Image: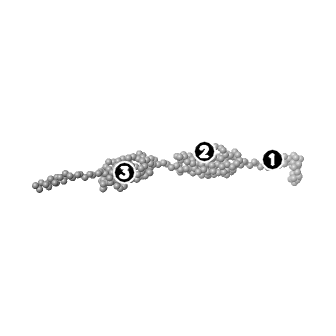
């Protein structure tokens, strides 16, 4: 009778054995920060797992290129930070791979956008080449200016003459000497100022250059009396000199004429 007990007991033990539960590691969440930025920005890609990775497996990401890159992390949190320079709307994909780079999970995807980097516009610079500090009314007064712009988008130079006349603007190119001419109509001290401008975004102006000019009326001509004697009627030079020195009445007596020049 004992020989039948062992098999029955063995069967009962076998009947109580339960299969072990195995949880498969999967990706539960992915993200990218920021979702949109200019070229050259550092983007951070993140992945959250439901359980830690099995030995030998890795989390790998394709950020929109043709190659997979391993993400770093511990436990259930993994990430990769990378500067992206090519522009456009891009798609990234993240998966779990074994040591032979064979996919072990569903691939999770997401999108992000890289825009063109905003161009930085620089203000032009302006230099005074020549300008006098004095001028005469109703006479051309000139100012020579030269502007430069490292962005090669120089547009014009504007000068305000400081006498209530309209400002004057002339188109220019980089490093070109530009001559402005103006006539002041009244005598006084005037302060002119000038600046260069570009056509960038936004439009920028240079630092202004200014100068005080003293404007005066022209000096009237000096009138010098000139005496032109008529023939001396046979008198010697000495006699003429004595008679001229005597008095002015001599001029009338002799019929001499005087002229002003």
Residue at left 56%, top 50%? 124
Residue 84 position, x and y percent, is: 42, 50
The crowd level at tag 2 (other Cα within 10 Å; few <14, some 14-19, many 20+) is some
Judged left or right of residue 202, residue 255 is right
Judged left or right of residue 177, residue 92 is left
Q: Residue furthest front?
A: 1
Residue at left 64%, top 48%? 192
Quarter of the rendering occupied by the N terminus:
bottom left
Viewer-side label of 3, 1: 3
Asked if the residue under mark 2 is in contact with the one under mark 3, i.e. CB atoms within 8 Å, the reply is no
Q: CA distance from mark 1 to mark 2?
A: 48 Å
Q: Secondary structure at mark 1?
A: strand
Residue at left 87%, top 51%? 244
> Which residue is more in the foreground, 68 or 58?
58
Judged left or right of residue 13, residue 110 is right
Viewer-side label of 1, 2: 2
**Residue occupied by mark 2:** 169
Can see residue 189?
yes
Can see residue 254?
no
Q: Which badge, 1 or 2, is on the more N-terminal residue?
A: 2
> Which residue is more in the foreground, 232 or 191?
191
Viewer-side label of 3, 2: 3
Residue 250 position, x and y percent, is: 88, 49
Q: CA distance from mark 3 to mark 1?
A: 106 Å
**Residue occupied by mark 1:** 260
Q: Secondary structure at mark 2?
A: strand
Residue 86 position, x and y percent, is: 42, 48
Residue 59 position, x and y percent, is: 34, 52
Residue 47: which numbered mark, if any?
3
Residue at left 87%, top 48%? 251
């Amino acid at each position: 009778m004992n020989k039948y007990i062992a098999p029955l007991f063995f069967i009962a033990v076998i009947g109580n054995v339960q299969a072990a539960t195995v949880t498969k590691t999967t990706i539960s969440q992915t993200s990218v920060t920021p979702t949109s930025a200019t070229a050259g920005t550092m983007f951070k890609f993140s992945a959250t797992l439901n359980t830690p990775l099995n030995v030998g497996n890795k989390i790998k990401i394709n950020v929109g290129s043709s190659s997979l890159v391993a993400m770093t992390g511990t436990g259930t949190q993994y990430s990769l930070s990378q500067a992206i320079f090519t522009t456009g709307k891009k798609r990234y994909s993240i998966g779990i791979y074994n040591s032979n780079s064979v996919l072990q999970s569903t691939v999770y995807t997401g999108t992000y956008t890289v825009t063109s980097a905003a161009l930085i516009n620089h203000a032009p610079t302006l230099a005074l080449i020549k300008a006098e500090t004095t001028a005469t009314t109703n006479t051309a007064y000139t100012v020579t200016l030269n502007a430069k712009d490292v962005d090669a988008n120089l547009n014009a130079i504007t000068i305000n003459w400081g006498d209530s006349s309209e400002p004057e603007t002339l188109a220019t190119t980089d490093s070109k000497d530009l001559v402005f001419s103006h006539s002041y109509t009244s005598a006084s001290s005037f302060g002119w100022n000038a600046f260069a401008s570009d056509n960038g975004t936004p439009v920028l102006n240079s630092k202004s250059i200014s100068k005080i000019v003293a404007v005066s009326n022209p000096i009237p001509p000096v009138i010098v009396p000139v005496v032109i004697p008529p023939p001396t009627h046979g008198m010697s030079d000495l006699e003429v000199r004595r008679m001229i020195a005597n008095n002015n009445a001599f001029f009338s007596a002799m019929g001499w004429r005087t002229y002003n020049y």
